[in-house]
Image (tube, rainbow, N blue to C red):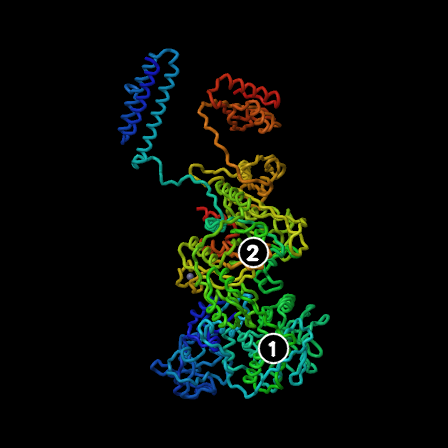
């Protein structure tokens, strides 16, 4: 027999064998298949082994490895099929499959990070990019350029942690708006996520450091309608189809200023203690960027208009994950973090 | 700001319910944070008629009465009031009712007689002081009627968040003005009850001094005081206020003090104008002067505190001493008390910045300072002096001494704003209707004169200090029309020309890598105690032990791990991406004045692992704990994620530092053994930290595809006996060098020392995989290279192949 004839036989046997194994539907029919293929007495493979010596001596090695490979392949196929049939018939099982899986530690992002990422995703679709800035700032960037009148009660809402004269931990991420306008020409559409600081004692609803995310859009003819439309779109994306409400507010750096409320996520507008019976929840502050801010940053306020907003992702995370105390977000208790990782 | 629903209705009639009023104010001008129903605790009180009253047999002051409380049967009630009268209506607390003080009414025996309820006095109901005992009612009502339904005492308090730009809303009058504008109603000042027939007409002079009665009034500090008016009232009888006045003050959470002081508080909350009454007998030599403090002046204030006046403070003095800290708090020396019969009533406008500076230095804030530092309506002063004087005379009697004087040396000139409607329309994004704008602005007190087509000259009312430019008017126009009337349709926009901050992608990659490795992200505070690399101090920290900003993140992670250990949590895998702060010396020129250098900031990542390497599973009773090889992996992983285009190398370090993390040869961080304040059962902790901004890098490059080899490989295992002085890295380098480019991979798979291995050496086993990309390797080729490697190892490093 030539090697190629032998190879032909081996290939045929492999193909037939696989078909036979796959066709078996019970343990006994699978055993029959095994006997007919590999059975020592009259199995097809041992029969083929007997043909080996008819090859030329220099082809013996090659022929042997061919047939051995097929043997291994068929044995593996039989074992696979046996397991499949085993698993299928519960009565045959000898492993307690109710026992727990072998698991791995699951990593997780912080809930506040998850909220920030979700916000970023929605705004990226609207042409926004991400800007960052320092957490320690000068008074000029944190207050003056943002149109805070010196020694004005508006400053009372920004109880400040100072690092020295005229240097402070930023009380909001708004300085990033100024730094961006100084560096780039419109169209500007940025989000600035980051930490901000206030001199608030750490309690269930206040923290001296907290995450903030702000947005800024500056271009030729950007209007209040754009502000309303973009933020309404955002609210509908973030909270699912929801009612929104805009109402007057005050920030030194915007005019007009507006607070955006969404339908209370707890009672869906019918009124509950969570929303003090109003049916609304305050989500973000916003407004048209004050011309003096645009000018302070070196752009021409006669030409460019814009809007800005700011929100606290921690508050939204607390709402979303039903977290009753803001300190939980800072404690870093692994039992809390594992909950988020699931 | 607390406001009373009923008080607002005294300014403007409206038919809105409290919740409708809340929604109106919130959508129009100021958020109403809360609605508090008042006197809700009187819900169980009913009106009852005393049908019979006889003396109690065992007492000389008690009465036994029969009371009709509308229940169908007469109730026996024992009463101790002297004024109990048959056929009169009284508020009655039936059995089961709870009085405002918390007292629960029960059926009981009083000196042997049954009592099934209680006839109530005003004090017991929290409605003011007792006059003659129980509260006789002069109204007409059926017995059994709910007291709250029959009496005009029910009210709702609105808790309003007035923002710093709208001090005009810090009064009932100001709120009523908005309500009137929104509802089309007319606002008017409440009529004064029992008005005395005096004609009072404040006399305004453009001067810094003047006279009222015998009193000389002077403004020395015209910078600190813009306007100063005063009335002199004599023959007063200071005493309790009438019920209506007490109720108004109670409704907004103020306590009644006496009729004169109550009127000043009523004027403050009602009209937004703080006022102060001085006991005129205590004012030396009939002189009232507004001046700057002189030298080290002392004053005992109404709250009983002795205070040293800060330099620059404005005071109200008499001929001898300071009698009040202007606009902030009065002095106790001239306080109006029960014996007072004549007063000087001050109604003024002080410089907001000066008030703010002084009250901050003193560390106090009062209802008066709160309004003055936000700005009062300077033009309203003369009318309010008249009104307040008349009100005092009506509640405390007395007569005015001449007309009040009003010093107004530098009348404020209105600054009209030129309003171009197209500009407003451009800003708001929708056309605005000139007629509507004009109509709406007029409703809230703006005066309007046309200048040209679509251009107006607008004069804001004197109480609106916040409206200075056309953008402020744009807000007025938008809010008066209603923010909700503007479109919310997305319009075309140009995408941002600003690229992402380069750090954004770096942080994202590192975060993903560590999350994938099973770590949990945290976002803790950056405050730490002094020392250990913390060099930036907060000058006004919340706590001394957290007065510094950290110089490394691992310090924070360690404290968070300790927090968990204290809660019996030993499996801790944390990471943080956050800022490290270092004292700055950079004097770079930045806009604005600056005397302190900005700290230098670096964005770092840090990670900490300790405890089991994987969750417990029954197949392996004891799970191995994290060790240095895990942190080495995490460090490499984080560094590669942060700097994907650079060469990352972990260089063995010294002491607690296991490895320095080098990126393109620059050390950017380290991986360390950590020392924690840990219980004995805790497993060792390991940490890494690296500076994500240490090297400049462009966008991450993608790795190009390399063909998957189709040729067979040849595997060779080398068991080596290496002197302890030789490092694995040395062997690794040498093997690679000698093997050449046919070596596809090199893996250390075993380290062993001990039995069978000579002292001072160890056994290292390496798996070498050879492959030629295009053809099958010949045995001789591989053997040849292996021999070369073995020779070089022996010759250069003294490393021998083990013969097993
Ligand atoms: Zn609700």
Q: CA distance from mark 1 to mark 2?
A: 39 Å
Residue at image point 44% right, 53% down = A238
Bin the neighbour count of mark 2 within 10 Å (Cα to Cα): few under 14, some 14-19, many 20 and up: many
Above or below, A307 against B197 in this view is above
Above or below, B489 against B700 in this view is below
- Which percent across, then down, holds residue B683? 53, 41
- Which percent across, then down, holds residue A50? 32, 15
- Which percent across, then down, holds residue B126? 48, 77
Mark 1 and 2 residues: CB-CB less than 8 Å, in contact?
A: no
Q: Is residue B82 left or right of residue B664?
A: left
Tell me which image quadrant ligand 1 sits in. bottom left
Which residue is disc 1 drawn over?
B347
Residue toward you, B104 or A265: A265
From this viewpoint, is residue A298 visible? yes
**Label 2: element kind:** loop
Which residue is disc 2 drawn over?
A172
**Label 1: element kind:** strand
Above or below, B198 against B371 in this view is below
Above or below, B536 against B317 in this view is above
Q: Is residue B228 left or right of residue A68?
A: right
Residue toward you, B147 or A109: A109
Residue at image point 33% right, 81% down = B72
């Amino acid at each position: 027999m030539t090697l190629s004839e032998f190879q032909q036989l081996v290939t045929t046997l492999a193909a037939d064998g696989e078909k036979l194994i796959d066709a078996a539907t019970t343990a006994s029919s699978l055993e029959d298949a095994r006997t007919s293929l590999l059975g020592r007495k009259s199995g097809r493979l041992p029969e083929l082994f007997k043909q080996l010596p008819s090859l030329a001596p220099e082809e013996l090695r090659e022929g042997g490895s061919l047939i051995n490979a097929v043997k291994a392949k068929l044995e593996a196929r039989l074992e696979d099929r046996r397991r499949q049939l085993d698993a299928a018939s519960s009565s045959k099982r000898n492993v307690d499959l109710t026992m727990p899986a072998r698991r791995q530690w699951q990593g997780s992002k912080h809930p506040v990070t998850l909220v920030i990422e979700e916000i970023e995703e929605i705004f990226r679709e609207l042409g926004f990019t991400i800007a960052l800035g320092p957490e320690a700032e000068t008074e000029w960037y944190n207050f003056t350029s943002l149109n805070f009148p010196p020694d004005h009660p508006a400053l009372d809402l920004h109880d400040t942690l100072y690092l020295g004269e005229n240097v402070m931990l930023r009380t909001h991420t708004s300085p990033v708006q100024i730094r961006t306008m100084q560096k780039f020409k419109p169209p500007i559409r940025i989000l600035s996520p980051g930490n901000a600081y206030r001199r608030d004692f750490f309690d269930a609803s206040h923290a001296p450091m907290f995450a903030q995310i702000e947005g800024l859009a500056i271009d030729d003819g950007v209007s209040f309608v754009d502000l309303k439309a973009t933020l309404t779109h955002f609210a509908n994306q973030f909270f699912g189809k929801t009612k929104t409400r805009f109402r007057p507010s005050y920030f030194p750096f915007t005019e007009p200023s507006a607070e955006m409320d969404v339908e209370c996520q707890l009672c869906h507008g019918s009124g509950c203690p969570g929303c003090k019976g109003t049916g609304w929840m305050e989500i973000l502050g916003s407004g048209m960027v004050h011309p003096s801010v645009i000018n302070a940053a070196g752009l021409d306020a006669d030409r460019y208009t814009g809007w800005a907003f700011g929100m606290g992702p921690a508050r939204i995370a607390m709402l979303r994950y039903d977290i009753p105390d803001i300190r939980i977000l800072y404690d870093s208790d692994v039992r809390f973090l594992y909950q988020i990782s699931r | 700001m607390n406001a009373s629903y009923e008080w607002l209705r005294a300014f403007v009639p409206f038919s809105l319910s409290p919740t409708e009023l809340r929604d109106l104010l919130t959508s129009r001008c100021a958020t109403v944070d809360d609605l508090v129903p008042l006197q809700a605790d009187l819900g169980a009180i009913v009106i009852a008629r005393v049908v019979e009253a006889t003396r109690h047999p065992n007492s000389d002051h008690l009465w036994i009465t029969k009371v009709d409380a509308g229940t169908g049967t007469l109730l026996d009630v024992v009463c101790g009031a002297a004024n109990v009268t048959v056929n009169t209506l009284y508020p009655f607390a039936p059995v089961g009712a709870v009085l405002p003080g918390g007292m629960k009414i029960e059926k009981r025996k009083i000196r042997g007689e049954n009592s099934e309820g209680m006839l109530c006095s005003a004090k017991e109901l929290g409605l003011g002081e007792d006059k003659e005992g129980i509260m006789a009612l002069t109204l007409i009502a059926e017995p059994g009627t709910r007291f709250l339904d029959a009496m005009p005492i029910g009210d709702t308090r609105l808790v309003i968040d007035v923002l710093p730009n709208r001090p005009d809303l810090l009064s009932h009058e100001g709120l009523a003005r908005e309500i009137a504008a929104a509802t089309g109603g007319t606002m008017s000042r409440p009529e004064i009850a029992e008005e005395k027939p005096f004609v009072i007409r404040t006399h305004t002079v453009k001067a810094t001094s003047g006279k009222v009665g015998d009193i000389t009034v002077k403004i020395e500090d015209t910078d600190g005081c813009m306007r100063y008016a005063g009335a002199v009232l004599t023959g007063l009888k200071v005493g309790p206020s009438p019920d209506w006045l007490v109720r108004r003050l109670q409704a907004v959470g103020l306590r009644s003090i006496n009729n004169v002081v109550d009127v000043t508080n009523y004027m403050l909350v009602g009209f937004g104008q703080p006022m102060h009454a001085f006991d005129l007998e205590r004012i030396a030599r009939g002189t009232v002067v507004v001046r700057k403090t002189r030298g080290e002046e002392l004053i005992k204030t109404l709250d009983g505190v002795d205070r040293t006046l800060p330099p620059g403070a404005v005071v109200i003095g008499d001929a001898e001493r300071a009698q009040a800290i202007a606009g902030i708090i009065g002095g106790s020396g001239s306080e109006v008390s029960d014996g007072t019969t004549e007063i000087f009533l001050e109604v003024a406008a002080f410089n907001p910045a000066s008030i703010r500076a002084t009250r901050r230095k003193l560390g106090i804030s009062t209802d008066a300072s709160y309004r003055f530092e936000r700005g009062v309506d300077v033009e309203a002063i003369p009318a309010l002096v008249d009104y307040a004087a008349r009100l005092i005379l009506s509640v405390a009697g007395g007569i005015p001494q001449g007309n009040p004087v009003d010093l107004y040396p530098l009348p404020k000139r209105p600054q009209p704003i030129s309003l171009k409607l197209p500009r407003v329309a451009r800003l708001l994004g929708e056309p605005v209707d000139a007629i509507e704008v004009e109509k709406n602005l007029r409703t809230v007190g703006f005066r309007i004169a046309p200048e040209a087509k679509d251009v107006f000259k607008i004069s804001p009312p004197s109480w609106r200090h916040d409206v200075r430019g056309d953008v402020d008017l744009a807000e007025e126009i938008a809010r008066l029309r209603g923010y909700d009337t503007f479109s919310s349709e997305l319009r075309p926009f140009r995408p941002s020309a600003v690229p992402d901050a380069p750090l954004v992608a770096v942080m994202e990659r590192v975060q993903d890598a560590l999350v994938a490795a099973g770590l949990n992200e945290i976002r803790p505070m950056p405050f730490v105690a002094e020392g250990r690399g913390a060099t930036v101090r907060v000058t006004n920290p919340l706590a001394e032990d957290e007065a510094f900003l950290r110089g490394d993140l691992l310090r924070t992670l360690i404290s968070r791990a300790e927090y968990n250990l204290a809660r019996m949590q030993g499996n801790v895998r944390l990471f943080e991406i956050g800022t490290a702060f270092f004292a700055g010396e950079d004097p770079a020129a930045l806009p604005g004045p600056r005397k302190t250098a900005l700290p230098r900031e670096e964005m770092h990542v840090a990670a900490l692992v300790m405890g089991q390497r994987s969750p417990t599973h029954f197949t392996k009773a004891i799970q191995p704990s994290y060790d240095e090889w895990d942190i080495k992996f995490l460090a490499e992983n984080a560094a590669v994620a942060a700097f994907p285009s650079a060469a990352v190398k972990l260089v063995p370090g010294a002491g607690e530092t296991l490895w320095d993390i080098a990126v393109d040869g620059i050390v950017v961080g380290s991986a360390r053994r950590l020392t924690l304040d840990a219980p004995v059962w805790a497993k060792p902790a390991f940490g890494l930290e690296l500076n994500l901004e240490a090297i400049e890098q462009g966008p991450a490059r993608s790795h190009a595809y390399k063909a998957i080899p189709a040729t067979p490989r040849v595997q060779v295992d080398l068991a080596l006996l290496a002197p302890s002085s030789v490092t694995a890295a040395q062997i690794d380098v040498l093997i690679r060098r000698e093997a050449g480019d046919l070596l596809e991979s090199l893996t250390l798979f075993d380290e062993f020392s001990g039995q069978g291995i000579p002292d001072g050496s160890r056994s290292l086993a390496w798996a070498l995989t050879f492959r030629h990309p295009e053809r099958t390797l010949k045995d001789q080729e591989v053997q040849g290279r292996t021999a070369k490697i073995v020779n070089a190892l022996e010759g250069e490093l003294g490393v021998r192949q083990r013969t097993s």
